[in-house]
Image (cartoon, coloured by chain):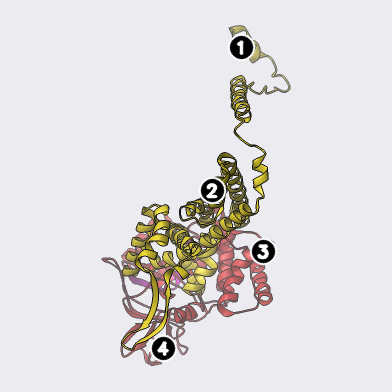
Amino acid sequence: MVLLNDSASHIAPMPLLIARGVHKTLGKNEVLKGIDLDVHAGKTVVFMGGSGSGKTTLLRCINHLATIDRGRLLVDGDAVGYAERDGKLYELRESEVARRRAKIGMVFQHFNLFPHLTVLENVTLAPRKVKGVNAKEAEELAASLLSRVKLGDKLGSYPSSLSGGQQQRVAIARALAMKPILMLFDEPTSALDPELVGEVLDVIREVSDSGMTSIIVTHEVGFAREVADDVAFMSGGKVVEFGSPDQVLGAPTDDRTKAFLQRVLS
Amino acid sequence: MSRDTITTAKTREPPEELIVVPQKHIGRWSLAAVVILAISWVGYNVSTISVIDYGAIPRYLFNPSVLSGVLLTVELAVLAQVIGVVIGIVLSAAKLSGNPVLVWLVSAYVWVFRGSPLILQILFWYNGILLVFPRIALKVPFIDFTVFDIPTSSVLTVFVASLLALSLNQGAYMAEIVRGGILAVDRGQTEAANALGLTGLKTFRYVLMPQAIRVIIPPTGNQFLSMIKDTSLISVIAGGELLTTVRDIYSTNSLIFELLAVACFWYLVLTSIAYAGQHAIERRLGRGYLPVTGGF
């Protein structure tokens, strides 16, 4: 627990997510150039930035869908893909990575529902096969989560018969079914028709309001302003501005943030 | 059409409902008539050939040795197909593992077994191996102790050689089919499963394989149809399957045409059953997917 003495830990509880000097290179391209970030439990943080700014890569590094080259990236005190020993990060066995990932929910841009399973089975698969929850209990939880995302009447449907907005709401229920301590949303509305964006944002807002720690990558400035406790603006693989939505989106000080907002809002 | 009718059509109210008159298809019907006549003529001529003993066909359909040939054909085809699928899954997993040695070995295997004639492979496993390795033995090196030492022919029977040849050959084809099926599943499926905490094996079992199966089943069904027919190649080593039995029978009674017709009947029965089975499985696996237009 060395980190409790770190300079950043001025608030009493340890942040749920801690990033320090996270570096990541894809091919010859350095995508993350030293990310420092804290996300406290119960908060909602929105990552914004232009394409290629590294926001999606950072999100994927958090649950080890992407590896990091250097730095420290801790969720609930553990590096998801690594064990830290003698100042080095050792890659963990697959089963241990899976165990740590199970605590982190992820929602993808393209939903990635399992097309061969019904809506109910999509939501019960991981609790049953990863946590070993029995069928009845898993189905009860799934049914209550699906009615929470207003899809209580679609339990037996297959994903292909649902609209994009409905599929994304199933995907959110599927992630929540693992009772995660952190939810990651990777551009959850970017693949949706404009008229379906609202219903998905409503569900994300509800999840965020319920006290779930959430990190959301999105281009929806209005939504970010409304739902975020903090906004991290990224550019060129760094967090160039971090603060309340009013501050980052309302009165940006960084030129790159200003330019981005001008492009998005015009 | 005259100028007159156009103007009247414009000025008048359109008639209440227009009736569509289907095309007459005169060409289609006359062609069909000609073809049917030609086939009847050929059929009539064949049926009056006195050297064909038509009564022999139904007589031999359920002849005990013909039936035993049918049974062996089914056994060989099913067993070789099952072993071939297992070989295919193992080889495709090896090829997808990324281990360069395994990738190279699998490629070499597929190259040899797909690139040479099956009939040659059958002869090779039966005749070739027996000549070169007359005995199979396991001896503990350095000390003079023999675990077993038996003549190869006692293990490598015609049946074992046939099974070996058919399944190893099928394995090469199945390896490529299974690999293609798994590669056809969207990359996002693996990511979603991993993000939920499923390990690689669980992802393979619950997410990738059930989806890959849909892609794997149709070509596998075709492979099985070919397998049923390819068992007839076993007759070159007198394997005792359907074609061997009818050949044995007609070599004594010279009813060549009649017994080949009997074999033909049984092969058609077997392939039809296999086809119906494939169709049923495909329909069952189609749940959750939108119907593909133009498919069968």
Examine the rendering and report whether any part of residue A218 can be seen. no
- Please determine whether, in this image, residue B218 is positioned above or below residue A229: above
**To which residue does mark 3 refer?**
A155
Quarter holding the C terminus of chain B?
A: top right
In magenta stretch: residue A177 = no
Q: Residue reaching furthest front?
A: B252
Q: Colour of chain B?
A: yellow
Foreground of the two, A103 or A212 = A103
Read off the magenta span: A237-246
Residue B142 in the image: above or below residue A140: below
**Mark 4 secondary-structure assignment:** loop
Q: Amino acid at mark 4?
A: His
The answer to which image quadrant residue A129 occupies is bottom right
Q: Which residue is mark 4?
A: A10
Report the amino acid beneath label 2.
Answer: Arg
Q: Are marks 3 and 1 on the same chain?
A: no
Tell me if mark 4 has few (under 14), some (14-19) or many (20+) residues whose alpha carbon lies within 10 angstroms of its own.
few
Q: CA distance from mark 4 to mark 1?
A: 89 Å
- Earlier in the chain: of badge 1 and badge 2, it is 1
Labels 3 and 2 in the same subunit: no
Give amino acid for label 1: Ile
Which one is in front in this view, the residue at disc 3 or the one at disc 1? 3
Which numbered disc, 1 or 2, marks the residue closer to the eye?
2
Kindly indicate which chain is depicted in red in the rendered structure.
A
Q: Is residue A5 visible?
A: yes
Residue B105, quarter of picture: bottom left
The prevailing secondary structure element of the residues shown in magenta is strand
